[in-house]
Every structure is written in C-alpha cells, then in structure tokens.
Image: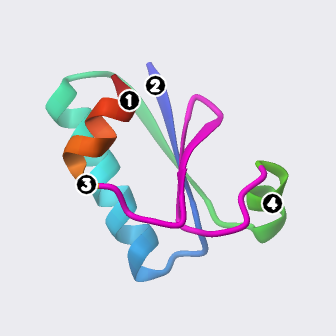
Amino acid sequence: MKKIQILGTGCPKCKKLSENAEAAAKKLGIGYELEKVTKIADIMKMGVMVTPALAIDGVVKVSGKVPSIDEIKKIIA
C-alpha cells in the first residue's frame, strides 16, 4: 500500500494535485492511503518551501507544480 501525501494549505492547485494523485493511483490499480498535510510547520518539516507538493511513502517527489495524472503514475510506479 502506497502512502500518498498532498502538502499544501488547501488552495485550488492543492485540490487539483489531490484529484490527479487519486486518479493516478486508481488507474494503476494499487492500494493507497491519501493524506493531506495542511499545517505549514508539518510541510516545512518535510523540507518543502513551495506548495503544492506530492510525497510518496514520506519522500517528497514534486514541489511547486501540479503534475499530470500520467506524470504521477510514473512517480508512483
């Protein structure tokens, strides 16, 4: 099971990233847990200075942009 974390305060880009990540995981047919990290202190602890960001299993993979569903599939797989 993959742990997918969306780091951001809930802005429209954060919501889009969340939608794309969920769609990518469903297309891959994998088990996943989606967590939204919204507290600035928690986001900064993970070393992220620009949101939105995507972390897989606790490792930040993308920061400051919203990757496409296909890009996220490659990141997860």
Q: Which residue is mark 1?
A: 76
Please state which amino acid type lies under the numbered disc 4: Met
Q: Quadrant of residue 14?
A: bottom left
**Left or right: residue 50 compared with residue 75:** right
Percent position (x, y) of residue 44?
80, 60
Mark 2 touching mark 4, by CB under 8 A?
A: no
Colouring method of the image:
rainbow
Q: Which residue is mark 4?
A: 44
**What separation in Å lies between label 3 and label 1 (alpha carbons)?**
12 Å
Q: Secondary structure at mark 3?
A: loop
Of mark 2 and mark 1, the one earlier in the sequence is 2
**What separation in Å lies between label 3 and label 4 (alpha carbons)?**
24 Å
Residue sitting at x 39%, y 33%: 75
Q: Which residue is mark 3?
A: 68
Of mark 3 and mark 2, the one earlier in the sequence is 2
Residue sitting at x 65%, y 34%: 58
Whether the magenta-drawn stretch holds residue 56 is answered as yes
Q: Which residue is mark 2?
A: 2
| Segment tinted magenta in the rendering | 47-67
Residue sitting at x 79%, y 57%: 42
Whether the magenta-drawn stretch holds residue 16 is answered as no
Q: Where is the C terminus found, in terms of image quarters? A: top left
